Amino acid sequence: MFDNTLELAENKLLILYIFNKIKFPVSNNHLTQIILENNLINYFTLQQYLTELVTSNFIKYTDESGNHRFTITDRGIKVLSLFGNRISNTKTDIVDNYLDNQMESIKKEVTVTADYTIENKDNFIVNLKAIENDSILIDIKINVGSNKQARSLCEKWKSNSSDLYNSIIQLLIQE
């Protein structure tokens, strides 16, 4: 029983460690991907731990513009600073290596969003957004006439948002 308690504590601290290392709100899907790709905790246990960490106010759940994200709280940071040494070096090394290789991809997915809604059968509203350091850089809503156009705009924005953003800014500030 004592081993189970130690493992539970270490796993919850590991989750806090990941949130603290990432430093920006992430979705349940992103966290799950990090955990499962590295075989750190099984899916169902992870979901239970997340619920318990939210209930204990170590992480908080935010809903920003329909995007559900988790972030570490001050209380979670304090607990991590007090007990973070209880996480095995092997696990922190795995997380550190993974995040070093994947951080840009995670950051891009979190800070660049593209989705669309159906207004009526021939009218789609595409919403393209880029966020940096909790500030909205650009938030564009475009009305298009087909589902295909809406999907295409979303794909282009997600794959090339930086260049598109710079082009839009240049067009707008040109004299």
Image (cartoon, helix red, strand yellow):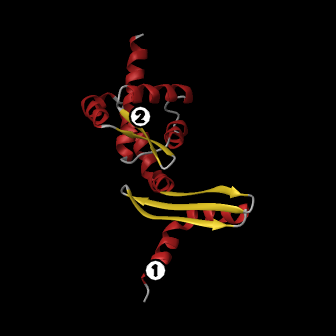
At mark 1, the secondary structure is helix
Q: Most extreme residue toward the bottom, as rendered?
A: 175
User: What x and y, as percent, mark residue 54?
Assistant: 40, 30
Taking depth in this image into account, of 150 and 83 the one nearest to the observer is 150
CA neighbours of label 2 inside 10 A, class few (<14), some (14 to 19), many (20+): many
Cβ–Cβ under 8 Å for marks 2 and 1: no
Q: Amino acid at mark 1?
A: Leu
* Quadrant in which the N terminus appears: top left
Distance between the alpha carbons at the discs numbered 2 and 1 = 43 Å
Q: Residue furthest front?
A: 120
The answer to whether one can see residue 41 in this image is: yes
Q: Position of residue 61 (x, y in %)?
A: 43, 37
x 38%, y 26%: residue: 10
Instruction: Point out the image quarter for the C terminus.
Output: bottom left
Q: Residue at x 43, y 48 (%)?
A: 99
Residue ID for mark 1: 172
At 42% across and 82% down in the image, what residue appears? 173
Answer left or right for 152 relative to 111. right
Residue 23 in the image: above or below residue 155 = above
Mark on residue 151?
none
Vertical position of residue 13 compared to residue 175: above or below: above
Q: Nearer the viewer, residue 14 or 113?
A: 113
Residue found farthest to the top: 1
Q: Earlier in the sequence, mark 2 or mark 1?
A: 2
Q: Residue 157 location, x and y as percent?
A: 57, 65
The three-letter code of the residue at mark 2 reads: Ile
x 36%, y 26%: residue? 56
Please give the residue where the numbered disc 2 appears in the rendered image: 15
Choose mark 2 or mark 1, whichever is in front: 1
